[in-house]
Image (tube, rainbow, N blue to C red):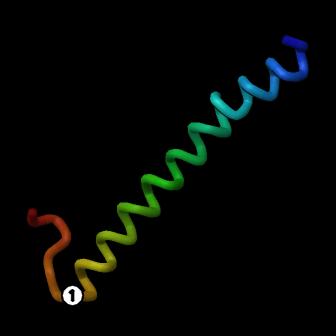
């Protein structure tokens, strides 16, 4: 594998991948919270 391919793979599985996963997690959390509030429910109660 060439160095450019290795660096690209590291970048996507390293910092960029973690950033995208974190943003997706926070978006899902916020969306569920807002959806629960819109239906008149407490988002923190199961």
Vertical comparison of 34 with 46: above or below: below
Which of the 4 image quarters holds residue 9? Answer: top right
* Picture residue at 29% right of the left edge, 71% below the top: 33
Identify the image quadrant of the N terminus.
top right
- Name the residue at 38% across, 71% down: 31
Q: Name the residue rendered at 21%, 87% in the picture.
A: 39
Location of the C terminus (image quadrant): bottom left
Residue closer to the observer: 13 or 44: 13
Number of dots carrying numbers: 1
Helix, strand or loop status at disc 1: loop
Say which quarter of the image contains residue 32. bottom left
Camera-side residue of 8 and 33: 8
Q: Is residue 10 left or right of residue 33?
A: right
Residue 44 picture location, percent across and down? 16, 65
Using a 10 Å C-alpha cutoff, classify the residue at mark 1 as few (fewer than 14 neighbours), some (14 to 19) or many (20 or more): few
Instruction: Locate residue 2, reporting x and y percent.
Output: 90, 13
Relative image position of residue 16 (x, y in whole percent): 67, 39
Find the residue positioned furthest to the left: 46
The residue shown at (9%, 66%) is 45
Q: Is residue 25 left or right of residue 44?
A: right
Q: Mark 1 = which residue?
A: 39
Q: Position of residue 42 (x, y in %)?
A: 14, 75
**Does residue 29 lie above or below 40 as drawn?**
above
Whether 6 is drawn above or below 15: the answer is: above
Vertically, is 24 above or below 36? above
Q: Is residue 35 left or right of residue 46?
A: right
């Amino acid at each position: 594998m060439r160095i450019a391919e290795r660096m690209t793979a590291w970048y996507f599985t390293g910092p960029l991948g973690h950033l995208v996963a974190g943003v997706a997690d926070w978006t899902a959390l916020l969306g569920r919270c807002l959806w629960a509030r819109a239906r008149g429910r407490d988002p923190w109660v199961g």
